Amino acid sequence: MDLILQAAIIGILTGGVYALMASGLTLTFGVMEIINIGQGALVILGAYLIYVLEQKLHLDLFVGLLITMPLMFGFGLLIEWAFVRPLKRDRIMLSILVTFGVALVIEGLLGLIFTTDLVRLQAWYTTASFQVAGFYLSYIYVFGFLLSVVLLAALYFLIYRTKFGASLRALMENRTAAQLIGIPVERVSAITFGIGVALTAAGGMAFGATNSFNPGSSYDLISRLLVIIVLGGMGSLGGALIASVLMLVIEDVTAVIWSPIWSTTVFFIVLVIVLLVRPQGLFGQVAGRKQ
Amino acid sequence: MSMLEIRNISKAYGGIQALSACTINVEQGKITGLIGPNGSGKTTLFNVITGYERPDAGAVNFNGTPITNAAPDRVFAHGIGRTFQLTRIFPRLTVLENMHVAAPRNGSMGIFRRWSSAHERSRAIELLEFVGIAHLQGMPAENLSYGQKKLLEFACILIADPQVILLDEPAGGVNPTMTNQLADRIRLLNQRGVTFLVVEHNMEFVMGLCDTVNVMHHGAKIAEGTPIEVRNDPAVLEAYLGD
Amino acid sequence: MKSKPIWLLALLAAAVALPLVFPNPTITTIAVLTVIFAAAATAWNIFAGYTGYIALGHAAFFGTGAYSLAIICQHWHVPADFTPFALLPLCGVIAAVVSLPLGLVALRTRGHTFIVITIAMFFVAQLLAYDLRGVTHGSAGLSLPIPLWSGDFYNMPFYYAGLLILLLALAVSWWIRNSKYGLGLLAIRDDEDRALGLGVKTGPSKLLAFVISAFFVGMLGALWAYYIESIFPPFAFDALFDVAIALMTFMGGIGTLVGPILGALLLEPAQQLFAVYFGQSGWYLVLYGALLLVVILLLPEGIVPTIRKRWAQWTAARARSSPNSPAPAPPLPPSPTSQHPAIAARGEGGER
Amino acid sequence: MLLNLTNVVAGYGGSDVLQGVNLAVEDGSITCIVGPNGAGKSTVLRVVSGLLRPRTGEITYNGRSIAGMNPRQILSLGIVQVAQNHSVFPKMTVRENVRLGAFMLSDRALVNRRLEEVEEMFPVVKERANDKAGSLSGGQQRLVEFARCLMLDPQLILLDEPSMGLDPKTLRQVFERVKAMQQGGRTILLVEQNARAGLGISNHGVVMESGRVRLEGSHEDVLSNPEISQLYLGGTISAAPKTSIS
Amino acid sequence: GTSGGSTTSSGPIKIGFTVSLTGDFSDDGKAVEQGYQLWADTINAHGGLLGRQVSLDILDDASNPDQVTTDYQKLITVDKVDLLFGPFSTLLTKPASVVAHRYGYALPEGSGGGPSVFTAGLNNVFDVSLPVASNLVSFAQYILALPAAQRPQTAAYATEDDPFTQPQVDLAKQMLEQGGVKTAYYNVYPAETTDFAPIAQAVIHSGAQVTIFGTLLPDITAFIQAFKQQHYNPQGLIATAGPDQGTQFLNNIGGAQSAEGIFVPNGWYAELNAPGNADMVAAYVAKYGGTPDDISSDVAEAYSVGQVVQQAVTQNKSLDNAKLIQTLHSGTFTSVQGDVKFDSTGQNTAATAYLFQWQSGKLIPVFPASAATAQPEYPKPNWP
Ligand SMILES: Nc1ncnc2c1ncn2[C@@H]1O[C@H](COP(=O)(O)OP(=O)(O)OP(=O)(O)O)[C@@H](O)[C@H]1O
Ligand SMILES: Nc1ncnc2c1ncn2[C@@H]1O[C@H](COP(=O)(O)OP(=O)(O)OP(=O)(O)O)[C@@H](O)[C@H]1O
Ligand SMILES: [Mg+2]
Ligand SMILES: [Mg+2]
C-alpha cells in the first residue's frame, strides 16, 4: 500500500514534468492544431541551451530559462515564418513534414556541436530531496511541477483572458473572418508558435535535469506528448496537466504492483477506453451542431 | 395516417428548449411548409427527423415505422433526404463527383462499380444544367459561389431520388429567378409523387408553393393551415411576420 | 493527356528493368527498400489519403506481418528458398485479421483522437512483441531462414516481389479511386456526417479501407522480415515507419494516386544515400532534414498537387493571353494575406 | 465618389472572375448589387476589402488607391465587410464574437459602450451572450455577424447578403438599421438576392452578370427594367415580397 | 562466393564497418569508431598489415537495420573493402552478419554479443569480447565468496528488456539464488522506458542489500539519481554498463563522490596487463585527450577486433576471407581484453570477466584477486 502511494506521488510529480514538456505543445498542437513532430527535438534543444549556460556561465537552471525562453521564442518565429506559413492547404497535416524536417536538422546540428555523449543538467536540487511524512520528495520534480502549473496558468490567462488570446482563437476558427475584423493573422500565428516553442525551453530544462540526454533522445518523447494533449482535450490546458499526471500515475502504479513491462500497455489501454467514451478528451469540447 | 409523423418531440440543450412537444404531420404527396422565427427549432426538428440529433422525448414515424433515433444513413435508406441550411457539400470533390455521391447506391457492391455510369452522369448533368452550374462540373465544389453551393446541394438531393425531401432554406442566397425555377421543379416532382417539407423565410416562395404551412415558435407549433389561413393568423403575424 | 498509358508503361518497364540495368547489389538493396516503402505508402494512402483519417499505427501491421512470417517459418520449418514468398499473402491476411478489431474500435473516433488511438494501438502491439516471449522471444528477436543465394542474385526476388506488391497496391488504389466505393471514401474525407446522410455506409467503408491497407502493409512487413532475416521488436514495430510513410505520402501528395510513390522514390533513396555519404561527417541528418524542408518550401502542397496546380495556372494564363484579348499586364503575385484556394487542386477529376 | 473601381480584373487560381469591372459608390449612398449566382458580386466585395488582390485595374477610396492592400490596412481606412458565408467563430461565445468586431479599437470604454448598444438593439445577442456562437440557429448566427460589424463605426460597409436566413421581422430590423446608418452619414455597398428588398432601400442599383457590370442606375431604373426583372429579379414586378420596406 | 576485395596488393587495405552516429545507439557509436581508429593508427605506425597501410571505410548506420544492410552491401560491392568489422549492438550485428555471410566475409566484432547473434547458424561472426551472459558471473562469485557475516541476504534485480543486458542479469540471479541470496525484487522493463522512478521505488521498497541492474548509461544514472533522492543505500550496486563510461558516467551522476563503491563488470580496464593495452591507452589519451579513466570499454572492444584480425591475417599472410574465417575458428589470439578463442558459434571462450569498482574517482579492478589492484569496498559507502 505504502509502495502504491509512493508510486502515485512519484507519478504526480513526474506528471508535472511531462506537463511542462507538453506545455508548448498545448499551443502548437492543442490550439493551433499543428502536429509538431519536432516537439521532442525542441525539448532536447532547450535542454542543450540550458546545458551550455550551465557549463559556460554557471547559470542556475531556472535563471537560464530567462535566456533560453526568449531565444527559443525567436527560433519559433523563424520556423513559423520560414516553414509553417507557406503551407496553404492541409497545413495541419503538412506540418508533420515540416516539423519533422526541422527536428532532423536540429538533431543533426546538435550532434555536430555536442557529439552524442550523454549529458545531464546538474544543480543542487537535481539530486536533493526533502522529507514529508517519511517519504522523500525530490526538489527538481516539485519545482518542475510548480513551474508547469505556473506556465499553464499563464498560458490559460493568455489564451482565454486576453485580446491576443481571443484573436488567436478566432483565427483558428475562421481565418477569413478573422482577417475581416482586422486580426493580423500572420503575426498572431507566428507569435503563438513562438510562444509554444519558448515554453518548450522550460520543458527541456525539466527533461535535462531528470534524464540523461543526447541529441537522439527525443524519439521516445513525442508520441507520449501528443497523447497527453489529446487525452486532456485539444486546447484544454488544465486537461494537459491532468492527463500527464494520470498517465504517469497509471504507469507508475502499474509498474510497482504488476510490472514495468505492462505499465505502458495498461496506460494505453486506459487511454483507448477513455477516448472511446469521450472522443473529445477529458476536458475537450464537442464540435458544434450540425445545421 | 400521415407519411411522416412527428409526435411530441422535445429537445433541450442545457437551458434552451429547442423543441417542446412539437407535433407535425407531413402528408404524402403534399408540399408542407415550415416557418417560424429564427431560433424557433426548425433546423433542430430536421436534425431529429434525419437522425443527426436524438430527441429527449417523442417519436418520429415514417409510413408507420418508427424511425426515432435511427442513424442518418438508415433514415436516408428509408427514403428521406434533406439539405442543410448552412450548405454542406463535399468541398474537395468536383461538382460532378458531388452529384455522384448522392446518386443512389444500391447494395454494398460499390467497390466493384465504377464511380459513374453513363446513366448517372447524364442525370447529374441534366440537374446541374437545370440549376445552371453544369459548366462548373469539373471544379472542386469549394470554389463555387455561395449560391452555387446552395444550388449544388439542391441538385444533389434531387439526384438521390428520395420519397420525402426536407429542404432547409433552399432559396436563401439564390437568385429570385432561379428561386422561381426551383419552385417549379419542386411542384413538378411533387406531381410525380415526391413529398416535401420546406423551411424557408422567403414568404413569397413558401406561400406560392406550399399546400399547408406549419408555423413554429419557441419549439412548438403555433399554427397550421393553408398559406392564406396562416398568413392572416394573428399569432403568426405577431411572432413571425410582424406588421 | 492521351499519352498517359504510354507514360505508365514506360515507367513500368523502367521499374522492371532497373535491377538488370543496374545490377549492383547496393543499388538493388536501396531499390528493394524503396519499393517496400513505396508500396506501404500507397497502401497507407488507400486508407489515410482517401478517407482523410491520419493513421499513425500501421507499423503495428508491418510488425504483425513480419512476426507472422518469422513464426510460421519457425513452426513449419519453411526452407530458405522461394517458399516464404508464397507465404506473404497469408501474412497479409493475418495482419488484416488483426486490423479488423483494431479498426472497429479506432474508427469510432475521428481527427486527432483517431491519430492518438492508432499511436496507442501501435505501442500496445510493440509492447506485446516484447512481452509475449512464448511466441516472439521478446527482445531476443527471431531469425528467419537465410537463403544461400549469391550476393549478386540475392536482391532480385525481393525486388520483384516488392514491385509486384507495389503494382498490386497501386492497382487496388486506382480501382478504388475510380469506384463508387472510393467516391464514398472521398466524401467521408470531406464531410463524414453529410456522407452518412446521403447513404454512404461510412462505418464499413472506412473499415474496409483500413483492412485493405493493413493487408498490404502486413505483406510488406513479411517481405521485409525475410529480406533482413532477423527481426527484433523495435525494428519490426518501428514508430518511425509510420512517420516515414506519412512523410512520403504527404510529400508526394496525399489522396493522389502516384503521390505516395513519388514521395517514397524521393525520400527513401535520399535517406539511404545521405546516411552512406554524409553519415560519417555528421551532416546526414542536417542534409536530409534540409532536403525535406526545401522540397516542402518549393512544393508546399505536395509534389503532385502543386505541379497540377501550376499546370492549371499556366494553361489558364496562356488562355488569358491568347491573341483576341488585349494582353493584360502580368498578374500581380498572389497577396500573401489572401488565401487562394487551389484551382482544380485535387482529384483525377475532369480527366475521366 | 467614395469608392471607385476601374477596369478591375480579378480571379482565383487560374481564371479571371471579374473581367473589367467599373463601379462607383457615392458617398453617403446605399448601393445595391444584384445579379445571378456566380456573377462575381461577392468577388467584387472581396477585392474591395482586400481578401483578394485584383490582377489589374484600379480601386480608389476617397481618391486614394487601395488595390493590393491587405484586409487589415483596408479595415483601418474605415471599410468593413460582412462576408456572405457564415463566419461566426463557433467555439467562442456570442459576446466574444461581437466584442471581437472591435478588434481594431483600443478604447475599452468605447468598446463596452458599443457592445451595450448592440446588445440593446438585438435581444438575441444579449440573451445568448454567453452561449457558444456555433450553437445558435443559422439566422441567429447571421445576426451576430451583423452585430459584430456594428462594433466598428466604419465609413463604408460592405454587406454580402444581409437578408439571408433572417426571418421577416428580423430582416426588417436589420434593413432599418442599414437605413439608419446611411442617414448617419455612412456609405453602404450591399449585395442582395432578395433583390426587391435590397433595391428598395438603395439609392443606386448595379446589375452584374458574368463578371461584368451589366446595368447601373437609380434603383427605380433597375427595378423597372423589364429585361433585368425577368432575368434576375424573378419576373413579374407586382409580386414584390411583403418584406420590402420602401 | 569467396572474398571479394581489391586485388591490388600495393594500395592500402580497406576495412569497412558502420557505426551508429545517429539514432538510438548513437551514444556508443563514437567510442566504437575511436577504437577502430586507434587500432588502425597503431598498425599503420608500425608498418601496416602485411606491409600495407590500413584505411578505414566508416559509414553511419543510423541505428537502423535497413541502413546497416545497405551500408554493408555498399562496403562489399561498391567500396570493395578487403575486410569487414562489426557495428555496435546485437540488434545491428545480426543483419550485418547476414550480408557479410552472403559474400563470404568474416564479421569480427566486439559489441554484438547477445545470444541471438550466435544462434542463426552463421559461421562468419566472431565476437572478441566476453560472452554477454557471463559478464556478471564475476560479481556473483565475489558476492558468494564474501564471509557469511558480510554476505547479503537479499538482492534486487532490474533490467532493460534488451538482448545484451537481460541474459547477464538472469544468469547472475540464478547463481546468487543458488548461493542462498534471496531475490527481493526482479523486474524487466521496456527499453523505451523514460521514467525510471517507479522501478527505483520498487527496488527501494524491496529493501534489498545488493542491487543488480541490467542497464546502459541513461537508465543507471536515473536509478542512482533516484536512490540519492530517496536516501537509499544498498550495500552493493552493480550495473552491466554505464559505470564503465568514465567521465561521461561521472558527469551524469554528479561527480566522482557519487560513484564511490559502484561496481561494473567488464572484460577490460585501462591498467589491464594485456598485449597492446598500454599502447592503446597511451594512444587514446594522446589523440582524444582526457585520462585513461575516460576510455569507454567500447573503445577496447573495437580495438580488440582489430588486433585479432591482425593476428589471423598475418598468420594467413593473406586477406582471403575464407581463410580468415577458418583461422579465426581454429586459432588462439590475444587482445587488449586478454585471450581470445572462438567456439564454433563465434563466441569468445577464453575471455575473463573482471569486476571493477569506482574508488576515489577511479575505476579499479577488484576481482578476481589475480587482477585486482585494490580490495573491493563493501559495503558501498552512503551517497554523498
Ligand atoms: N447544439 C445546440 N446547443 C445549444 N443550443 C442549440 C443547439 N442546437 C440548437 N440550439 C438552439 O435551439 C434553438 C433552435 O435552433 P434551430 O436551429 O432549430 O432554429 P431554426 O428554427 O432553424 O432557426 P433559423 O430560422 O434561424 O434557422 C436555437 O435557440 C438554438 O440556439
Ligand atoms: N475560391 C474560388 N476559387 C475559384 N473560383 C471561385 C472561387 N470563389 C468563387 N469562384 C468563382 O467565381 C465566380 C463568382 O463568384 P462569387 O462568389 O463572386 O459569385 P456571387 O456573384 O457572389 O454569387 P452568389 O450570388 O452565389 O453569392 C463563380 O463562378 C465561382 O465559381
Ligand atoms: Mg435553421
Ligand atoms: Mg456571393
Image (cartoon, rainbow, N blue to C red):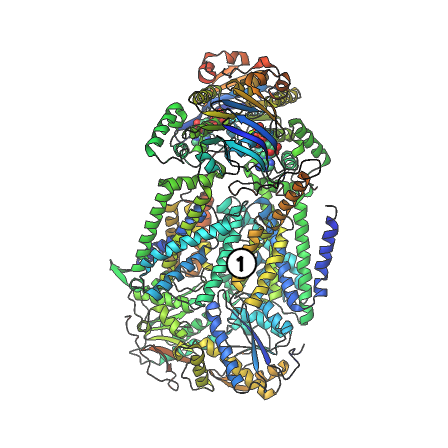
Q: Residue furthest front?
A: D63
Number of marks in the rendered image: 1
Question: A5 or A194, which lies in front?
Answer: A194
Chain letter behind tag 1: C
Q: How crowded is mark 1: few (under 14 residues within 10 Å), some or many (20 or more)?
A: some
Ligand 2 picture quarter? top right
Asked if ligand 2 lies within 8 A of label 1, the reply is: no
Residue E66 location, quadrant: bottom right
Q: Decide if residue A58 is on the left or right side of residue C324.
A: left
Name the spot of residue E80 as percent of width and height, x first.
63, 75
Residue E88: tell me if it is visible: yes
In this view of the protein, can residue E353 be seen by the observer? no
Where residue B239 sits: x, y (%)?
A: 44, 17
The secondary structure type at the circle numbered 1 is: helix
State the image coordinates of residue A78 (x, y, percent, origin top left): 46, 52
Measured as percent of width and height from the top left, residue A3 is found at 32, 59
- On screen, residue C285 versus residue E160, left or right, reads right
Horizontally, residue A107 falls left or right of residue C63, namely left
Work out whether residue E285 or residue A252 is closer to the camera in this orientation and state it: E285
Looking at the picture, which amino acid does disc 1 mark? Answer: Ala
The answer to whether residue A165 is above or below residue B27 is below
Which residue, given by chain and number where applicable, does mark 1 sit on? C290
Q: Is residue B238 above or below residue D145?
A: above
C239 and C216: which is toward the camera: C239
